[in-house]
């Protein structure tokens, strides 16, 4: 493993140096802002430092251009995770290096967004992109309101709820503890059963919490849906074979602290054992942004996951929905706003969310 340190005035400069020398296979080990230069320690300039590593063979290939790159599924997953982490880190450092200056006509919009829970740097970046692409000076207030609202709507991206097919599909619910994965699964199962068009099976892999298994067992009995408990990927394959007559199988995964990397990798092994699947990352909108970003880093290896936001009934601020979409561009799916099953869940309404972000308190 070859480890190198790169320093530059901004993230773009450093990443350019890094990619040019180490190539796209480089792994980011650490990033930070440092002070460098100055006279007698005074007037030091802020610089970005990135420490990266690359396999010696990959580094040799980059320098000599005489080897073919070997890929396998494990490397593909690692590369995808690295790309997501690089994008996340780059956005964070781009924001750190950007000025918070903004066109005077956009200041009131930033104040509104921040009051609704949007991070100031995120709000500044989005509004400055409007200023760069639209001549706002000749727009009246009503027109400018519409432009800002539309940009917020666009930044929220697409909505992708569960797609049920003729072929059996397995739906995994992943995420940290305490965000409401089990209740969310029960709500979705209830909605599918009430439609009366599809057969459903339930699986719990959350064997670390007896309460979670018991909770799902109660729901399975009320809804008259079969439930199976699994401990490893082999158990999951056996359970799916027994559920071969079910259109859709919902899987509740273990939820412990997001810092438990080993448990997250166990969950990844579980999801990797299934082909026709969808993965939903469940997040609480009331979690602080710093913790959310830490969660996103840990769960970035679930590259195709969609996002469910819970506990909207516990906050007046929808800002974290936009914050997460800014840093982690996976599609939204559902939002929940209460504990009632099968109620208090809906497909994310982007116009409604944008309206809440734009609402003056």
Image (cartoon, grey):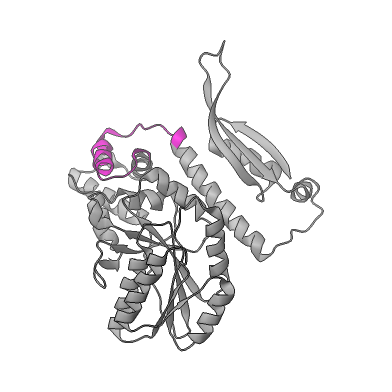
The image shows residue 49 at horizontal and vertical percentages of: 58, 33
* Residue at 53 percent of width and 58 percent of height: 263
Number of marks in picture: 0
47 up-or-down from 181: above or below: above
82 up-or-down from 275: above or below: above
Residue 70 is left or right of residue 52, and the answer is: right
Viewer-proximal residue among 156 and 206: 206
The image shows residue 222 at horizontal and vertical percentages of: 29, 80
Look at the image and say whether residue 107 sits in the magenta stretch. yes
358 up-or-down from 348: above or below: above
Secondary structure, magenta segment, majority class: helix
Please report the bounds of the magenta region as a residue range: 96-121
* Residue at 55 percent of width and 81 percent of height: 238
Look at the image and say whether residue 86 sits in the magenta stretch. no
* Residue at 79 percent of width and 47 percent of height: 60
The image shows residue 319 at horizontal and vertical percentages of: 30, 48
């Amino acid at each position: 493993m070859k480890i190198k340190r790169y320093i530059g005035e901004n993230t773009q400069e450093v990443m350019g140096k890094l990619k040019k020398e180490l190539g796209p296979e480089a792994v980011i080990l650490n990033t930070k802002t440092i002070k460098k230069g100055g006279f007698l320690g005074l007037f030091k300039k802020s610089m970005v430092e990135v420490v990266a590593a690359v396999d010696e063979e990959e580094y040799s290939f980059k320098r000599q251009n005489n080897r073919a790159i070997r890929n396998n599924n494990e490397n593909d997953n690692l590369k995808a995770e690295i790309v997501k982490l690089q994008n996340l880190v780059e956005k964070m450092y781009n924001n750190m290096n950007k000025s918070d200056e903004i066109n005077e006509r956009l200041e009131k919009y930033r104040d509104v967004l921040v009051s609704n829970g949007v991070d100031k740097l995120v709000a500044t970046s989005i509004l400055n992109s409007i200023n760069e692409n639209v001549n706002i000076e000749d727009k009246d207030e009503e027109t400018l309101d519409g432009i800002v609202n539309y940009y917020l709507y666009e930044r929220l991206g697409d909505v992708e709820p569960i797609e049920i097919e003729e072929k059996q599909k397995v739906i995994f619910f992943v995420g940290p503890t305490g965000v409401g994965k089990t209740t969310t699964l029960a709500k979705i199962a209830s909605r599918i059963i009430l439609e009366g068009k599809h057969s459903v099976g339930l699986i719990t892999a959350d064997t670390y919490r007896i309460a979670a298994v018991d909770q799902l067992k109660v729901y399975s009995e009320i809804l008259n849906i079969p439930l199976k408990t699994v401990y490893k990927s082999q158990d999951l394959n056996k359970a799916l074979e027994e559920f071969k007559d079910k259109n859709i199988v919902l899987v509740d995964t273990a939820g412990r602290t997001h810092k438990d990397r080993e448990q997250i990798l166990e969950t990844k092994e579980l999801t990797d054992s299934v082909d026709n699947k969808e993965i939903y990352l469940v997040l609480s909108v009331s979690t602080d942004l710093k913790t959310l970003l830490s969660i996103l880093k840990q769960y970035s290896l679930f590259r195709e996951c969609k996002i469910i936001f819970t506990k909207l009934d516990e906050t007046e601020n929808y800002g974290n929905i936009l914050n997460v979409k800014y840093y982690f561009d996976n599609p939204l799916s559902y939002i929940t706003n209460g504990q009632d099953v099968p109620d208090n869940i809906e497909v994310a309404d982007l116009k409604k969310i944008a309206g809440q972000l734009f609402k003056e308190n």
